[in-house]
Amino acid sequence: MVQRQLCSLEQLRISEFGRPSPRHGLQLLFWFANHCVTCEVINFVLIMKLVSDCQPERGIYGFHLFGNMEELLPVLNRRCKSKRQVLYFEVGNLNTDTYPGSANLPTYVRENYVLEANIGDINLDRIIVSYQLRTRVVERVYVTEHDRATFGRFSTDRTFEIHPELIQALQSPQADLTTFLSRTDYWGDIQVVQANDIEEMYYPEPSSQQMFNIMQNYSGSTARAERLGLSTCEQDVDSVKKKKEGGGVSFVKILLSAGMLYLAAKCFGWLRSWWRLGPDENTLRKMLSHHHVMLDYVY
């Protein structure tokens, strides 16, 4: 049995139809309102009609007859069915093996459906319409879901009628899918940020004078950087030259110093030995008679 009529987004949210993710009922309802039906006020009554591309009797989008065998919805009397040709049609089964036309449903309706996964919350939701074949008028729109406890049956406690005003509200240009899903708590506590919620940043185009100043500053900064780099490089070269020329103790200086120390030690040793022997005449005579070998070549 139909529980109640839903006339607003708030009532739809409270009903918990088609949510949370990964269910597809809310996306299915948004698609139906915006792509399958038009709303027109005739004699102060809001009339819904199916568009020409949406033909339930031909199985478009996976539409198929709903027999109402379990009397989930009000029973259509035979007179009504024969005179106005009113029938129930169901849509929303995403199994393309059973209903190939459902493959033409938009991606945002089908994206959470995984046939092989056998997830309990996948492919539960349905839309059922009472539809006049001759006039294409939609008399009633219902939403329901399969009963998890009873295979193949719909839940009587989760069946609602959608008021034409709610369908019309979903057709508003301001009613995009993301906003609709957010307002009906489809994602639960997850916060969704939209692009139009972010403040637009405006960057004014600089004038010709501003561009000239920028180029001048850039050129001056570049020149200073180059001068600084050159001076630093010159300082490094000078320091290397100083180290090579005399900025440290060279190997030649070390050798000369060692030789001088060696000669001083030898002289000191010779004087010491001479002092011990005593400066007698023989010694002095020997010293005086000894001449350097190089004098033979000079004189």
Image (cartoon, grey):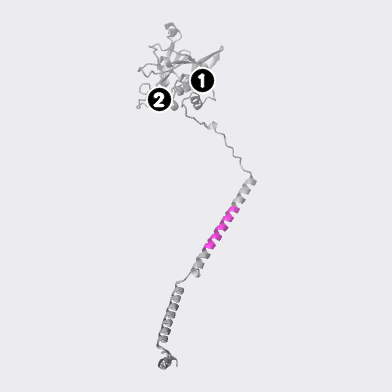
Q: Label 2 belongs to which residue?
A: 103
Q: Quick check: is 71 in the magenta stretch?
A: no
Q: Earlier in the sequence, mark 2 or mark 1?
A: 1
For the point 46% across and 74% down, the residue is 253
Q: What amino acid does circle 1 point to?
A: Glu
Q: Is residue 34 above or below residue 207?
A: above
Q: Could you say where residue 20 lies in the image, as x and y percent from the top left?
A: 44, 24
In the picture of the structure, the residue carrying the numbered disc 1 is 10
Question: In terms of secondary structure, where does tag 1 sit?
Answer: helix
Q: Is residue 295 above or below residue 51?
A: below
* Residue type indicated by callout 2: Ala
**Percent coordinates x, y for residue 125 in the rendering:** 42, 20
Q: Nearer the viewer, residue 247 or 18?
A: 247
Question: Is 221 inside the magenta-drawn segment?
Answer: yes
| Marker count (numbered) | 2
Query: Residue 185: x, y in percent?
Result: 48, 24
Quadrant location of the N terminus? top left
Look at the image and give the residue range highlighted in magenta: 220-236
